[in-house]
Image (cartoon, rainbow, N blue to C red):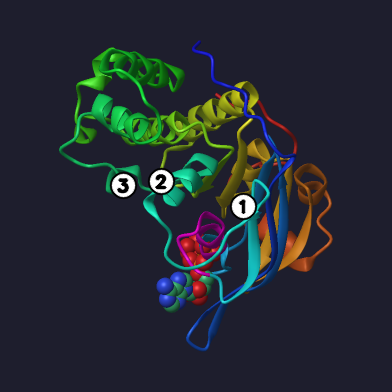
Amino acid sequence: MTSLKKSAGPDTVIEAAGLRKEFGPAVAVDDVSLTLERGASLAVVGESGSGKTTLARMLVGLETPTGGTVTVCGRPRKPGRVSSAERRRRAREMQIVFQDPYSSLDKLQRIGAVIETSLDLHFSLTPGERRKRALELLEAVGLSERHASMLPRQLSGGQRQRVAIARAIAVEPQILVLDEAVAALDVSIQAQILNLLADIRERSGIAYVFISHDLAVVHQISDFALVMSGGRVVERGATRALLSAPQEAYTRALRAAVPRPGWKPERRPVG
Ligand SMILES: Nc1ncnc2c1ncn2[C@@H]1O[C@H](COP(=O)(O)OP(=O)(O)OP(=O)(O)O)[C@@H](O)[C@H]1O
């Protein structure tokens, strides 16, 4: 399979301290701190409305915190308007993949062009080099030249999510934030995408922040996890330990609510 460049740089890629987000009188995120090490996979788990997406959006810079700080790859992120050069630099540090790739893909743009546009923004390549790299990236996510000439609507949901992942890793970021990235997919397709993500992390050293309400998914993809409830972190630790022996009543309740019959917190092969 195509090689992906191993990332280099500081050992801590995200340092967030005391993050808070208010929407009017409502507090969506309340005093959340976290650290993400290079190449690590951190899950943020919690029920709907617990503040996961708001936290992810603050990390990526799509939402301005009401309080607290975010430092990415050693540089504090300053709120406010940023130049397009700074936006590009930030994009090289961190990319995000959303739950619904269909809405984030241009419906009229062919898949090869989606990837080439991403490459064009960040690298000086000749048209030939760009096309070659786009095909390599599609191949890295299990798609082929045949898919490059298709439109998003001609692909399945799982294939579209592969395109969104290829577009994100094209930028060679240090960090990939995945916000419910497999939630809309069938369980067997979920497993394929989780395998793909594990493989990409192993080959590239990209660190993940994996936002999910699904403990079975979190268990397969993350080394560490934060459990959020009501905007706060109620428990944190190594995913395995946290899921096999949750200390907090809330985490126990979340685990009990996992809808898969016979689900056990042991590592299972996927695929
Ligand atoms: N733009 C906004 N304006 C007002 N309230 C918001 C906004 N975004 C989020 N909220 C509120 O903040 C709280 C946390 O929402 P958030 O989407 O972060 O939770 P979540 O854990 O990601 O849930 P879900 O999985 O359902 O998206 C919720 O009460 C939500 O209604």
> Would you say residue 48 is visible in this rendering?
no
Question: Label 2 amino acid?
Answer: Ala
Q: Nearer the viewer, mark 2 or mark 3?
A: 3
Circle 1: is it few (<14), some (14-19), or many (20+) Cα within 10 Å? some
Query: What residue is shown with label 3?
Result: 104
Question: Label 3 amino acid?
Answer: Ser
Q: In the figure, 151 relative to 36: above or below?
A: above
Left or right of 163? Residue 256 is right
**How would you classify the magenta stretch by its main secondary structure?**
helix
Circle 3: is it few (<14), some (14-19), or many (20+) Cα within 10 Å? few
Q: Nearer the viewer, mark 3 or mark 1?
A: 3
The picture quadrant where one finds residue 185 is top left
The picture quadrant where one finds residue 252 is bottom right
Whether 55 is among the magenta residues is yes
Question: Label 1 amino acid?
Answer: Val
Q: Position of residue 109 (x, y in %)?
A: 19, 34
Picture disc at residue 184 = 2
Quarter holding the C terminus? top right
Residue at image location 66% in from the left, 60% down from the top = 254
Query: What residue is shown with label 1?
Result: 258
Residue at image location 27% in from the left, 24% down from the top = 112
Q: Nearer the viewer, mark 1 or mark 2?
A: 2
> Would you say residue 175 is visible in this rendering?
yes
Q: Position of residue 180 (x, y in %)?
A: 49, 49
Q: In the figure, 145 relative to 18: above or below?
A: above
Which badge, 3 or 1, is on the more N-terminal residue?
3
Disc 3 from disc 1: Cα separation:
29 Å
Residue at image location 54% in from the left, 42% down from the top = 93
Magenta stretch bounds: 54-64
Left or right of 245? Residue 143 is left
